[in-house]
Image (tube, rainbow, N blue to C red):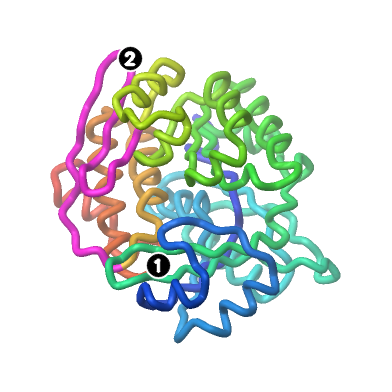
Amino acid sequence: MKKYQVVGIGNAMVDVLARADDGFLDQAGVQKGIMQLIDMDRAVDLYDKIGPAKEISGGSAANTIAGIAHLGGRTAYVGKVKDDQLGAIFAHDLRAQGADYATAMAPRTETAETGRCIVIVTPDGERSMNTYLGVTEFLSPDDIIEDEMAQAEWIYLEGYRFDGPDSQAAFAKAIDACKGAGGRVSITLSDPFCIERHRDAFAVMVRDHVDLLFCNRSEMLSMYQTKDFEDALAKAASQVGIVACTDSGNGVHILSNGKRWHVPAVPTQIVDATGAGDLFAAGFLWGLTAGHDLQTCGKMGNLAASEVISHIGARPEADLTALFAAHGLL
């Protein structure tokens, strides 16, 4: 048995969550429902404009790893923070969930700070993310511990991390170490605009290295440059062993080995959509490493996503194991 079921690599961030209406988004120049990269000056300006906020450790892959750890999975995470207040919060919160986290912190002398994502949640539950990457942008191959990757059944790569100058080299090192030891590779496409910035790199990685592809409908259409959802799904399934494509309130489409399953979404009052995809991946990957069939994995993913969108913040507050059991999945 390998030491880890899943090792995640991504942007180590602290989420700053605030509520506002669409009028505020217009006034502040924030595009609704997507992730925008911002610099430190913009981060400070936007922070000054928002109302009361809640700071919670986040980062897409970190949320997924935290969810798997919450379920009792054996996990580790790789992502860079600075030796500052937000960096200490991030490291504590992730380790408190039970995940291993050993990435070296950037020193206090570093000019850039720990990354943060200012998430503005509108009354419809939609989240608009404004991301200052800070030191997490500079994750490099030196931060990848090959033995850690070799000890993983799966590695989980965050598409947002493609924005770093050395990130693709770091991913390549992780993939080689994981696959060289018999592990498998999963990736989340993260965001349509991220795909547009790095489509060629995504295409090569998905085609040549990925065993499990996570995405949502808009990301799938962007990846394969088509408006035909069925065509995009077919193209993805021809390249990847398992495809799990979420479709908001329509549930998830899962394709593998010529078969297809549709798992309906769990009806939920949306309070904050932040982390829905992250926790879907957590439930799905945990189910997969625990030996469940793909349809059950989809149900677990949907339940985990439904829990996280029912409250503010991108990490589970309810007992997911108990939730799975209550729905007859355990």
For the residue pair 59 and 29, the one nearer the viewer reads as 29
Is residue 221 positioned above or below 82 on the image? above
Which picture quadrant has residue 179? Answer: top right
Is residue 165 positioned above or below 152 on the image? below
Residue 251 located within the stretch drawn in magenta: yes
Amino acid type, mark 2: Asn
Identify the residue at horizontal 59%, vertical 33% (top origin).
151
Tell me the magenta residue range: 244-271
Amino acid type, mark 1: Gly
Query: To which residue does mark 1 refer?
Result: 313
Query: To which residue does mark 2 refer?
Result: 257
Residue 188 located within the stretch drawn in magenta: no
For the residue pair 99 and 314, the one nearer the viewer reads as 314
Mark 1 burial class by Cα count in 10 Å: few <14, some 14-19, many 20+: many
Where residue 69 appears, x then y in whole percent? 44, 51
Quadrant showing the C terminus: top left
Identify the residue at horizontal 43%, vertical 39% (top origin).
219
